[in-house]
Amino acid sequence: MFKEAKVMFIYTETSLHCGSGTSLGVIDLPIQREKYTDYPVCQASGIKGVVREWFDNKYGERDSKIKYTFGPDFGRGDSEAHAGAATFTDGRLLLFPVRSLNSVFAYTTSVFALSRLRRDLEMAGESVGWKVPAESDKILGVSESKVKTGDNKVVLEEYTFDFQLDEGVKAIAEWIASNAIPQGDEYNFWRQKVKTDLIILPEDAFGDFVKLSTEVQARIRINNDTKTVDKGALFYEEALPCDSLLYSVVMAHDPACDNAKRPTDLQDSTDVMKFVSEIKSKRLQFGGDATIGKGIVNVNFLNGR
């Protein structure tokens, strides 16, 4: 059982393709989705692999702290079988950007997504001062909202919704701005935007947007000889849009080996969590299509209890 846990937020700075393989549907290369909600997700194995790669690049693949934190890599010659001391959950969706008639786009979420975040925060030993609003058939937002129109409507894509003021949303927006959005100066605009443009959608509407409003790009392959498109080389690829926010819970336990084998600065779960937390405020590359600029994310850890 884990002894330490922290919530790690993942903010997409470019579109993100965590692919699920090929499909027989309209989209040839869809993104990973949860089975029961159909929400976009980044599977835990992919997150763990990206984080490990970052440490490999910083410390070298043979560093013993990496082996005991993430587990042995038999492909690199490790022979001792043991579990890694760090565990990552799937990256769950919290905020999804949707094009808005006013203010370019809105940060959307739902009662379910917020409730699940609260449950995961509780698992990580974190308490928050805000409460999840009751479900509504209207869009909930703050009085300073810039996405609502003069007649108290919100237009997202081609759909119009009634707007309802809910003061509870303000506390949620301020908490997200202070804790989940990256804290660098370059993020001042986005921290202010989430305070005014966070809206809570009816559950079905949020489910439809995260399913139908992802980015779908047509891609082709050029024949090097003819300089034309190869026959049958047109395919469609899906991606989670830029300015989406996901989170994963990172858990740590003591290294799975005798005390004598543990590296000096990796003696227990506290050391493991401190080690993994070195990626805080760092930019990592998640998912596929790295060479065309996809998957750049900013990682932010929620600070201590």
Image: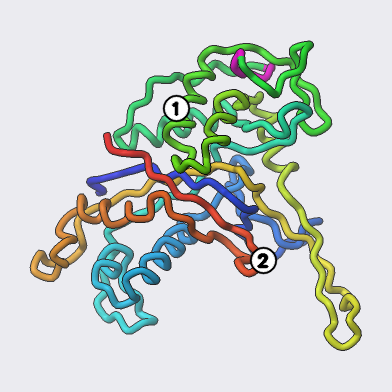
Could you say which is closer to the camera, residue 180 or residue 44?
A: 180
Instruction: Say which quarter of the image contains residue 149.
Output: top right
Q: Position of residue 45 (x, y in %)?
A: 46, 60
Q: Position of residue 51 (x, y in %)?
A: 41, 61
How far apart, in angstroms, are the residues tagged by discs 2 and 1? 34 Å
Q: Is residue 200 magenta?
A: no
Mark 2 vs 1, N-terminal side: 1
Q: Is the residue 6 above or below the residue 133 in the image?
A: below
Q: Which mark is residue 175?
A: 1
For the residue marked with disc 1, what is the amino acid?
Trp
Give the magenta range: 137-143
Q: Please tell me whether mark 2 sits on a helix, a strand or a loop.
A: helix
The residue positioned farthest toward the front in the image shown: 185
Seen at 29% across and 77% down, the residue is 62
Q: Quick one: quadrant of the C terminus? A: top left
Q: Which mark is residue 292?
A: 2
Seen at 28% across and 38% down, the residue is 304
Q: Is the residue 183 above or below the residue 31 in the image?
A: above
Q: Is residue 141 magenta?
A: yes
Q: How is the image coloured?
A: rainbow
